[in-house]
Amino acid sequence: MIDSSYDRFFTTLGNKNRLAIIHYLAKYGPKNVSQIVDATKLEQTAVSHNLKMLLSCQFVHLTPNGKRRVYSINEETIKPLLTLMDKHVSEFCKKTCDKCAVSIL
Amino acid sequence: MIDSSYDRFFTTLGNKNRLAIIHYLAKYGPKNVSQIVDATKLEQTAVSHNLKMLLSCQFVHLTPNGKRRVYSINEETIKPLLTLMDKHVSEFCKKTCDKCAVSIL
DNA sequence: CAATCATATGAAAAATATATCATATATAAT
DNA sequence: ATTATATATGATATATTTTTCATATGATTG
């Protein structure tokens, strides 16, 4: 199954908390772990675990700064990706959004 | 968490078997359930369950034909999506593909 | 260099997703 | 109408993910 390579790619994105982190970084720019913890109200360890996954797929970049670890979004991939999703939602889920279980923002 | 709406969207894609179905339909055009079962070597019930999820996100379309149910890919979304993924993989995983756990096709 | 702050790691527990099994439904053929 | 074929559904079993907990590491400060 030659295409199963995308598997991890999508599962990494398919998670509320990781998407929350992505969204936060996309909106407010580079942030360190504590800031992400404060913003998302997730536990520090959960944030670290999720960031590790995001980093391993290179959806985020890491820039250590002293004892802080600053994460930033990989805009090149994430921005068009989210745009594509928005497009899909608005085209195919216009009036039947319960059908596709994706709410219109 | 305004962006959690994408959640189901990505989890639906983040599964080996559903990606196999998507890939098969993308490559060979509209197929009925039995054909998908034969091609993917999955159980019929598993295929039906997975098709239901894909349909609910409108990644595939359904055209009943007699007692057959013919599924086809939603090219408008799937094609650019896979293109985007390919791009990401080839840009960010060139030599370090173990890092992002996505193998180059 | 001991203490502290920021973050990461690994293992176990809890939650969620997926596969499987039994069965239902719908169309078609006899 | 009965039987066969194609597919779907719901409940449960199984597998995978995610969270949590305890602790480790690494940089900074006093």
Image (tube, coloured by chain):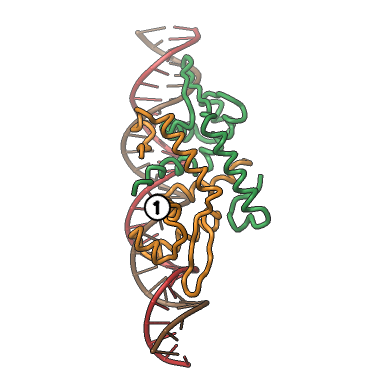
Chain colours: A orange, B green, C red, D brown
Q: Nearer the viewer, residue B23 or B39?
A: B23
Q: Residue B69's spot in the image, x, y percent?
A: 48, 21
Is residue C17 shown above or below B40? below
The answer to whether residue B77 shows anywhere in this view is yes
How busy is the neighbourhood of tag 1: few (under 14 within 10 Å), some, or many (20 plus)?
some
Question: What residue appears at the point 41 percent right and 42 percent down from the top-left corner?
Answer: B8
In the rendered image, residue A30, in percent from the top left (x then y), is placed at 47, 60
When asked about the image quadrant of residue D2, the answer is top left
Q: Of helix, strand and loop, which one carries label 1?
A: helix
A46 vs B75: above or below: below
- Residue B41 visible somewhere in the drawing: no
In the displayed structure, does residue A11 sit left or right of residue D9?
A: right
Name the subunit of mark 1: A
Q: Amino acid at mark 1?
A: Ala
The residue shown at (60%, 58%) is B99
Mark 1 lies on residue: A20
Residue at position x 38%, y 46% in the image: B3
Indicate the quadrant containing the C terminus of chain A: top left, top right, bottom left or bottom right.
Answer: top left
